[in-house]
Image (cartoon, rainbow, N blue to C red):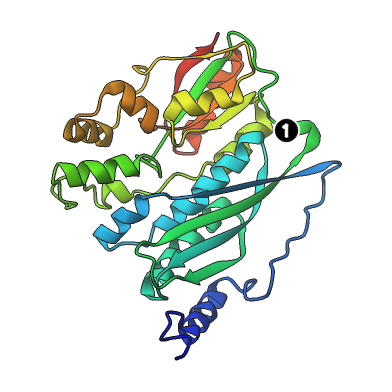
Amino acid sequence: MDYKSSGVDIEAGNAFVERLMKKAPGIGGFNGMARVPSGYDKPILVSGADGVGTKINICCVARDYTTIGIDLVAMCVNDVITCGAKPLYFLDYISLNTINPVVDDIMVGILKGCELSGIDLLGGETAEHIRQGNIDLAGFCTGIVEESEIIDGHLIKEGDAIIGIESSGLHSNGYTLINDMLWRHKISYDKSYFNKGTPELLTPTIIYSELVQDLIKDFPILGMAHITGGGIPENLPRCIPNGLEAIVDYNSWPLPEIFKKIQLAGEIPEEEMKKVFNLGIGYCLVVPEEVVTDVQLRIDGHGYKSWTIGYIN
């Protein structure tokens, strides 16, 4: 017996690391290091970990893993920035049954996501589990924020406005329901049902880091929420103080076509849609009413659509 016949190909793993080091020279050691940026009086490190869930199943069916890495970075970075932190670096974990070209495709997306976020890939782990059927991904991001500039929602008050920033589609949530829907209703994943150049079900998650860093520099952003699993009802309240509530008008922005297709194909009740999907809003801001117009103009300048979707009561 040897390690390869038992399911771990050391040579293939080493070759993968060598290829990756050409694109991310900082990796390959026992650890990754990053210098704490200067200019902070009381720096606070902020960390987050997340994955892409069963969106990876769609990659398998579509035979396209080139953008799922962007989703992985986005899910972590978008969480970290909700407190006003600037992301610094990223680590990944990839688990699959054997090293194969799919890993290189996944890394294409991870490196692109890091580039879009302005952060470094410091390292990670690629694990071979021969009896594992599906690929699993996890990511870890660390950012930094000045202690006195942490955005935690404590300044939110009655009458403040809620701005919703568009998503690119499903982002990385609700895919367990989607996979079940496709199987139950025998809907094949093909270009006739889900396609807009890039298949709609694989459109990568927007990374809001650059936009948010620009906004918090010039505007009083009181609270932020990354709209992921649980939709607006589960995520928006996480940035709002006890005793206050968010009143959201779901008719204040256009529902993207992809969600209409999913609801129709799966016969999914409206309330369930709200609890599972982002419904076209990927990120929310809570701001004083008097700055809404200026904030939305700045968002528009970054190429994103936004709407005033509610208020604090």
Front residue of 269 and 88 = 269
x 36%, y 39%: residue: 174
Q: Quadrant of the N terminus?
A: bottom left
Q: Is residue 94 left or right of residue 191?
A: right
x%, y% of residue 22?
Answer: 55, 77
* Residue 96 visible to an observer of this rendering: yes
Disc 1 packing (10 Å; few <14; some 14–19; many ≥20): some
Instruction: Tell which of 101 and 256 is nearer to you.
Output: 101
Residue farthest toward the bottom in the current orientation of the protein: 1
Report x, y in % for residue 35.
77, 59
> Which residue carries the number 1 mark?
150
Residue 280 appears in view: no
* Residue 230 % position (x, y): 43, 31
* 43 left or right of 282 in image: right
Q: Secondary structure at mark 1?
A: loop
In this view, 260 is above or below 44: above
Image quadrant of residue 211? top right
Q: Residue at x 42, y 46 (%)?
A: 205
Q: Is residue 150 or residue 124 the one in the foreground?
A: 124
Q: Residue furthest right?
A: 41
